[in-house]
Image: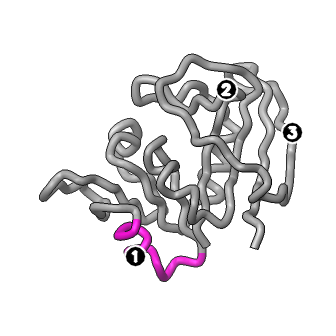
Amino acid sequence: MKSIIVAVAENGAIGYDNHLLWHISEDLKRFKSLTTGHHIIMGRKTYESVGKPLPGRVNIIISRQENIQFEGCLVAKSLEEALELAKNDSEVFIIGGGEIYKQALPITDKIYLTRVHAGFAGDTFFPELNLSEWSTESLTKGKPANDDGLGYTFINLVRHK
């Protein structure tokens, strides 16, 4: 199964200047819980913002640059190549950034979405979803007593078969 995991502001923003726009502890815990033990796929810029391989996961970095290496990571030249590297995993997580989400969305089976109930100035946005293609599997409102005082909702979406 190919899954996207993403936190998105109400205006679609997911990042600015290669950084996340908020810090929500419960969202980070959810991310870790869901992705640990699986392959995660990200673009080079996302990897550079993280700065190191995420532990307990097989990190696959997509980069078009020739002969580039990232210590402790696999490197693929395309999303298709990255998915081939992860083909034996029961669930593969696409974790960003914006361009990788755009490429992955048409072939994604599930989206683990954290909707952040605020708008943010951003330079990276999540692609617009055609909600007629998706069903809500679960919806859980988060407690706004998080690090930024932001309200948020965890929404799991599955693509109609």
How is colour applied across the structure in the image? Answer: one colour
Magenta stretch in the rendered image: 80-90
User: Quadrant of residue 74 in the image?
Assistant: bottom left
Q: Which of 112 and 109 lies nearest the eye of the viewer? A: 109
Residue 120 image position (x, y, % from top left): 62, 19
Task: Please give the name of the residue rendered at 41% of the width and 24% of the height, measured from the top-left corner.
Answer: 17
Q: Secondary structure at mark 3?
A: strand
User: Separation of disc 2 and disc 1 at Cα?
Assistant: 33 Å
Outermost residue toward the bottom in this view: 88
Q: Are marks 2 and 3 in contact (CB under 8 Å)?
A: no
- Looking at the image, can residue 36 be seen? no
Task: Please give the name of the residue rendered at 52% of the width and 22% of the height, measured from the top-left corner.
Answer: 122
Task: Please give the name of the residue rendered at 59% of the width and 78% of the height, measured from the top-left corner.
Answer: 90
Q: Is residue 130 above or below residue 17?
A: below
Judged by depth in the image, the label closer to the viewer, 2 or 1, is 2
- Looking at marks 1 and 3 on the same chain, the residue that comes earlier in the sequence is marked by 1
Kind of residue indicated by mark 1: Glu
Disc 3 designates what residue?
141
Disc 2 designates what residue?
11
Kind of residue indicated by mark 3: Lys
> What numbered label is drawn on residue 84?
1
Residue 25 falls inside the magenta stretch: no
- Looking at marks 2 and 3 on the same chain, the residue that comes earlier in the sequence is marked by 2
